[in-house]
Image (cartoon, rainbow, N blue to C red):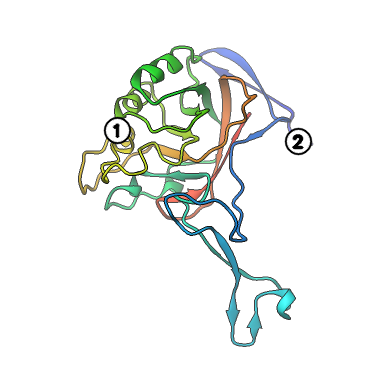
Amino acid sequence: MPLTLIRFFVNNRAWLADMTRPVNLARPLVLDGSGPSWFGAPSPKETPLEMPGFPGRVSDGGSVNVSRLEFAPHCTGTHTESSAHLTTRANPVSRLVTPGLLPASLVTMHDGTAGAMTAGLDGVEKGFLEALVVRQPTPFAFDPDALTLAVRHGVQHLVVEASSVDPEDDGGRLAAHRAFWQLTSGPIEGTSVRTITELARVPAGLTDGPYLLDLQIPDMVTDAVPSRPVLY
């Protein structure tokens, strides 16, 4: 029988999580070539694996469907990335996201300033900032100071609706990414234990407040992977 309620404690206070009403924050990854993409990247697509004597599609006479998937995680839907996005040092995101439920807070922000971040974090329940989900009614980039504030409040996993925490074209500085990962500018070899999830989709009717986050990712050894953040 599946669990319906989980009772847990944060700061010696008991909480209940309703496991019967998960909220999926991921965008579907459509693979027929019609799905959305960002930053000018090709749309994701699925093609049959073809080898001599083996058509990888049943409709073409094959015995099974075997597909090749082509997409750029950073550009084609909800994805989670590590500091290896910017550095020369291997730091795959799969090392940083472990299975389990994370105390998280959902806040609504209308701009990416430090003032807006301060206002959003002021009302957060103590102990629910291992992950921060930011609803953005209109997507925006973040000021580096805003993400530095998030780090100071203990945020390890940041989930946003924008395609990037930085402007689409900022000359390659990626100052907001670097602020959250606490990386200096230029080619470096630093690493961070924090993750950024971009292109999430937060339902408009979801109330700001404390949640549990299940940040689901495949075990792929790379800097960014498609992901499925689920709130309870």
64 vs 162, nearest the viewer: 162
Image quadrant containing the C terminus: top right
137 vs 10, nearest the viewer: 137
Say whether residue 193 is left or right of residue 101: left
Q: Position of residue 159 (x, y in %)?
A: 48, 34
Q: Which residue is mark 1?
A: 179
122 vs 37, nearest the viewer: 37
Q: Position of residue 115 (x, y in %)?
A: 36, 17
Above-or-below relation of 37 to 203: below
Tag of residue 2: 2
Q: Residue at x 37, y 43 (%)?
A: 168
Q: Position of residue 60 (x, y in %)?
A: 71, 79
- Amino acid under disc 2: Pro
Above-or-below relation of 134 to 218: above
Say whether residue 49 is left or right of residue 94: right
- Amino acid under disc 1: Ala
